[in-house]
């Protein structure tokens, strides 16, 4: 059990065994993870969570105001078993109850449905059951690992670590605009993944059900394994991580059941521990291409979170994303409608309120720069402000 208890993350294989994020993704070895840990017999029990309660106000004729909560929590158990380690993990969210009307306001966001209609200028809640997975890591040598992952609901090997679990995004309470090009598969049905790690390199392949979860977020949706993905990841040092992935998704959108998609992503993550804090950054590219009408959407994201003087956090998220005519409620086939740039800056500070938990008050401001085709609908300078309370376990 020493490998599991040692959170020093000395090499790539050891970082993977910790499985502190969704699916089989991994962040840089030096990335801290705030979680509770306790030994119970042969099992190491862990609990990780992040929850925000917020009020959001947006300008623009298409903006909205709302009081809501984004949240998730992850219990996990690990033990040594035979020549390797067994991990059992669940991930849950109360967003189906804490986000009313099946969406929260997010200017220029598009993807999935609410009440049978496309969601535009809003983000859907996560499913109550985000992940239910069993993982077995078979140690083949000091720096080699064979990993098997099976999940009726889980995260296949495509994309970077999903935004709710990235250290660079941990203080930001809302989703990126590029979510549906970069990491929207982090909740998929019937996922099977196999991966091999040696030294600083890892290669993985997944089969899964390609349809995105429907809007009934309390339900568990199942389906045939009809989609696949491949991911190549590298950890060239304690503070660096990178990946490239490719996937074919069968019928991901409920409103376009005959449309298949090709998805490619690439990302680089950097984490630097500081004397009284930490600095985590991510650079992400995502691309989807419809295999029926060849519509392509690209997204580019740079986000960074700096923890300093122990209790303080500063962060930014900058995005450049393609949007389609779905935003404009136009009849006819979905076509490109220009690009949008989004710039977010935020600050929060921890304070003592509950034992074993870290709590914070914070705020962030987002400003948007839409392209000319969208300016006549949104105006030239839309923006949004969020004030929030944050809660998560106190840990490393």
Image: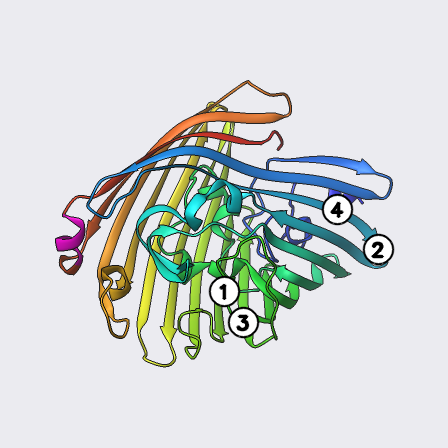
Residue that mark 3 sits on: 229
Q: Magenta span has 60?
A: no
Q: Magenta span has 375?
A: yes
Q: Nearer the N terminus, badge 1 or badge 3?
A: 1
Viewer-proximal residue among 182 and 310: 182
Query: Could you tell me which secondary element the residue under label 2 belongs to?
Result: strand
Q: Is residue 314 left or right of residue 276?
A: left
Residue that mark 4 sits on: 77
Disc 4, disc 1: CB below 8 Å?
Answer: no
Q: Nearer the viewer, mark 4 or mark 1?
A: 1
From the top left corner, tell me how far across and down residue 40 is, in percent: 83, 38
Up-down: is 311 above or below 167?
Answer: above
* Disc 1 packing (10 Å; few <14; some 14–19; many ≥20): many
Query: Could you tell me which secondary element the residue under label 3 belongs to?
Result: strand
Q: Nearer the N terminus, badge 3 or badge 4?
A: 4
Q: CA distance from mark 1 to mark 3?
A: 15 Å
Residue that mark 2 sits on: 81
Q: Write down the region rendered in magenta.
A: 374-379
């Amino acid at each position: 059990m020493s490998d599991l208890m040692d959170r020093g993350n000395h090499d790539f294989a050891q970082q993977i065994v910790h499985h502190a994020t969704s699916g089989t993704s991994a962040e840089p070895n030096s990335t801290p993870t705030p979680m509770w840990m306790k030994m119970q017999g042969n099992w190491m029990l862990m609990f990780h969570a992040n929850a925000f309660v917020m009020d959001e106000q947006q300008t623009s004729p298409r903006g909205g105001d709302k009081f809501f909560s984004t949240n998730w929590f992850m219990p996990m158990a690990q033990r040594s078993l035979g020549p390797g380690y067994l991990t059992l993990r669940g991930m849950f969210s109360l967003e189906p109850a804490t986000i009313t009307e099946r969406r929260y306001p997010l200017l220029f966001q598009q993807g999935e449905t609410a009440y049978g209609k496309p969601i535009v200028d809003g983000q859907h809640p996560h499913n109550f059951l985000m992940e239910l997975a069993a993982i077995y890591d078979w140690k083949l040598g000091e720096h080699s690992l064979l990993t098997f992952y099976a999940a009726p609901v889980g995260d296949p090997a495509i994309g970077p670590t999903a935004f709710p679990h990235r250290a660079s995004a941990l203080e930001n309470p809302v989703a990126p605009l590029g979510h549906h090009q970069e990491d929207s598969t982090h909740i998929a049905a019937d996922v099977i993944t196999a991966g091999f790690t040696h030294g600083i390199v890892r290669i993985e392949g997944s089969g899964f059900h390609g349809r995105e979860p429907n809007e009934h977020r309390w339900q568990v949706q199942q389906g045939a394994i009809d989609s696949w993905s491949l991911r190549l990841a590298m950890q060239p040092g304690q503070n660096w991580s990178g990946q490239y992935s490719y996937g074919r998704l069968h019928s991901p959108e409920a409103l376009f059941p005959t449309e298949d998609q090709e998805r490619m992503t690439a990302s680089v993550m950097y984490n630097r521990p500081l004397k009284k804090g930490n600095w985590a950054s991510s650079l992400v590219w995502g691309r989807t291409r419809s295999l029926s009408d060849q519509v392509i959407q690209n997204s580019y994201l740079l986000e960074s979170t700096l923890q300093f003087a122990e209790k303080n956090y500063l962060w930014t998220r900058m995005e450049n994303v393609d949007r389609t005519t779905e935003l404009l409620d136009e009849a006819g086939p979905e076509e490109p409608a220009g690009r949008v740039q989004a710039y977010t800056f935020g600050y929060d500070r921890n304070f003592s309120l509950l034992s074993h938990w870290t709590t914070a008050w914070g705020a962030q401001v987002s400003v948007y720069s839409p392209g000319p085709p969208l300016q006549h609908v949104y105006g030239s300078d839309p923006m949004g402000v969020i004030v929030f309370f944050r809660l998560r376990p106190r840990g490393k």
